[in-house]
Structures are given as structure tokens and as C-alpha cells.
Image (tube, helix red, strand yellow):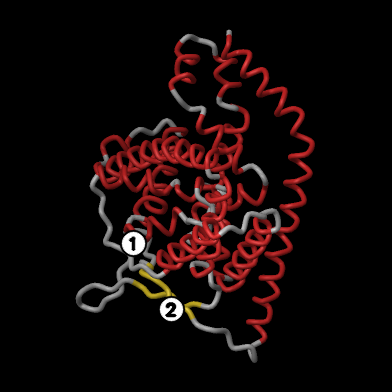
Amino acid sequence: MGAANKVPGVSGGMVAYVAGFYEELIYSLQRVNKNAFKLLISGRIKSFHQYINGRFLLLVFAGTIFSYFSVSRLLDYFLRNYELYVWSLFFGMIIGSIYYILKDFNDWSWKNISGMALGVVIGIAISFMSPAKENDTLFFVFICGIVSVSGMTLPGLSGSFILILMGNYVLLLVDSVNELYKIIVDIMSFDISFLDDAVRMRYLKIISVFTLGSASGLVLFSHIIGFLLKRWHNMVTSVIIGFIAGSLGLVWPWKEVIYKVSEYGEVLYDSLGDKVVENYHRYWPDLTDHINWIAIGYIILGIAVLLALEWYGEKYNIKKEPKRAAKMAQITSDQKK
């Protein structure tokens, strides 16, 4: 999920959905509430851990943090060197995810079809929006944090791409993350000279506010989506299907990058010396070129990966269901106590 969240156009929530733990993620995040804090403050750590489904959330966030400094770097490498094939794989995975959700969706009422159409329209509209300029105002960074986690809670809506549209993708997920990594290395080396470096402290302040916004957004969105899922499950599912279908425009493999330019026509670069992406020009592939047929092969591979994830998710959930029931019963007992 962490690796997916960092790639523009790919949703971590979609990974959770097709792997079969999306609703568990939403309902576990919902349990981060006043009751949880009461248990924590009163020193009932075990009850707190059980109440919030601590083992599950710990695995999710540990994997997310780990991937930001490892798997996402590997993805960055492949995107730089094999971009067409990477986007083809993602495109196939999204097609597979649409099949995965549709095969169990049986409520084809006009209301749900309208919700699906709305999701498609919004997804496509987001795909073709033009990014804003970078803004490092702390309040705006906090809002970016809230919005960025939409990719974890709304399958098909890429939090990273939303950050591109808001103008702060490079600032928050490239520059600030790299500076945080360097600061962590310095601390482990017992070097605290960064405290006297105004530029590095600025990035530390920015990533701290962004993290606070992300945590707030996770709790906020999980409560909203959890509420909607309980009352209008099929309607929410239909909108999610639409979002995912609309997001195909974001990961269309055959596209050329449009870079940001200054008012003087010069290409703009970020602090790492990379060109700043503004948007994409999409086109149809030339089927006389064998490279495009290889890309189509990766699309088929992406669909196969999703089918494998579906098989794994169903197998895992079947085995896990009795344990989950017992666990929820224990949580209920603890609440009564």
C-alpha cells in the first residue's frame, strides 16, 4: 500500500480492496476514537490494542513506512528506466481490480448505475486537471496531508496524483521525505548538527505538519466512509467502481510527459535536479512496434497479478474469519468491562 500510495495514478486503497482487507482497514481506523484514548490513558494497553485492531494497523503502517524508503525507491528506478512497462502493469492491475469488484456486485439499480457514472466522471476529470504551483504554507501543507490519504481510504483515487494537482508532490513526497531520511541517518550517527541548519529544519517542520494532517485525514475519512458503508454499502461500492474505472486515464501507458516551464519558457527542476512534471499527453500505441506488444503483455500480466491477489485474499479471509469473530467478541467483552 505504501509503495502504491507514492506512485501518481495508483491508489493504495485499491490494493487493500482487491487484497480483501479494505473494509477491515476502514473499520479499524474508525476505532481510533475517544473510547480508544480512554483505554490508553487508563493504562489498559492490551484492551486498547485489541480495540483498535492493533496488530493489523501496525502491520499496515509499518509496511507503508518501510516501503517509502525501500520499495518506492525500487519503483522509482523502474519508472525511470522502464516507464512504459510499469504503467502497463498498473493499467492491467486496475482492469483486473474492476473485474474483481464487478463480479460480486449484483445491485444494478439506476441509483447505483448513476453513482458509478458519477465516479467515472470525477475520476476522468481529475486525470486531466492541471497542477497548481508549489505552496509550503504550513496550513496548506496540513490540508495536503488530509487530502493525500484519500488514496488509502478511497480506492481508485490516487493521493499522490492529488498532491501533484495541489502542486506539492515534489515538496512533500520527494524533497521532504529525502531530508527526513538524512535526518534519521544523522540521529543514528549521533549527529544533531541539522538543528542549526535552517533549510533542513524547514523540511522537518513541513514533513511533521504533513504527517499530522495525514493522521487526521485517515481518522476523518475512515469515519465518513465507515458511516457511508454501513448505510449505503452498494451505492458506495458503485462510486468506488466508477473512481477506479476513471483512474485508468491516470495510468494509461502510452503518454508523453509535459514538464513545467517558467514564464521565460525554461524547464523547471526540483531540488534533486529532476524536471517537474505538469501533466501528460496521451496517445494510441503504434501496433507495428514490438515494444508496444510487450507493453500489452505486461497489461495481461497485471490482470493475472490481480487474479492471484484475489485468490490469495479469498483464501486468507476464509481462514481468518473464525479468528476475527472471536477477536471481535473479546473486544466487545472488554468494552463491557
Q: Amino acid at mark 1?
A: Asp
Is residue 88 depicted above or below 293 in this figure? above
Q: Residues within 10 Å of mark 1 (few under 14, many from 20)?
A: few
Q: Is residue 275 visible?
A: no
In the image shown, does 211 or 102 lie closer to the viewer? 102
In the image shown, does 234 or 337 lie closer to the viewer? 234
Q: Quadrant of the C terminus?
A: top right
Q: Residue at x 75, y 46 (%)?
A: 314
Report x, y in % for residue 44: 54, 11
Q: Residue at x 42, y 43 (%)?
A: 182
Residue 335: name its quadrant: top right
* Total marks in image: 2
Report x, y in % for residue 283: 50, 82
In the image shown, does 208 or 126 lie closer to the viewer? 126
Q: Amino acid at mark 2?
A: His
Residue found at the far front of this picture = 110
Kindly check if marks 2 and 1 are in contact, taking CB atoms under 8 A apart as contact.
Answer: no
Q: Residue at x 67, y 76 (%)?
A: 296
In the image shown, does 4 or 263 lie closer to the viewer? 4
Q: Is residue 103 visible?
A: yes
Which callout, 2 or 1, points at the residue further toward the start of the chain? 1
Query: Of the numbered discs in the image, which one, if any, rests on residue 281?
Result: 2
Q: Residue at x 54, y 84 (%)?
A: 284
Is residue 200 depicted above or below 74 in this figure? above
Residue to which mark 1 is pinned:
270
